[in-house]
Amino acid sequence: MKKALVNLGFDFQSRVPIQADIFRTGHICIVGGTGSGKSMATLYILYGILSLAYEIQLFIGDFKKSG
């Protein structure tokens, strides 16, 4: 089975990227307080997913009830 590794971050202590295989994981949940970087993390991860040469299905839900 092919792997689809997406960078989620970087471990500065061990100097290695933190990666997830989206074919194996299937889901990613991003949580945090206001101003903690959830939107930037989401954009970074989406860029990694969309840069793969695989056909993917992408579903985005925004459950904030302010609009």
Image (cartoon, rainbow, N blue to C red):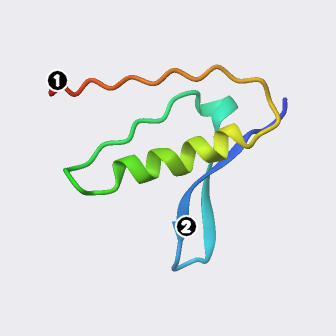
Residue at point 64%, 19% (across, down): 57
Q: Is residue 29 above or below residue 59?
A: below
Of the numbered discs 1 and 2, the one sitting upstream in the chain is: 2
Q: In the shown orientation, is residue 10 left or right of residue 66?
A: right
Q: Which residue is mark 2?
A: 10
Q: Amino acid at mark 1?
A: Lys
Residue at point 70%, 24% (across, down): 56
Q: Position of residue 25 (x, y in %)?
A: 59, 32
Which of discs 1 and 2 lies nearer the camera? The answer is 1
Residue at point 48%, 35% (across, down): 28
Q: Quadrant of the C terminus?
A: top left
Q: Quadrant of the N terminus?
A: top right
**In the depicted view, which residue is nearer to us: 19 or 56?**
56
Q: Which residue is mark 1?
A: 65
Q: Position of residue 6 (x, y in %)?
A: 65, 47
Residue 18 occupies quadrant: bottom right
Q: Is residue 61 above or below residue 3?
A: above
**In the depicted view, which residue is nearer to us: 56 or 4?**
56
What crowding class fits label 1: few (fewer than 14 Cα within 10 Å), some (14-19), or many (20 or more)?
few
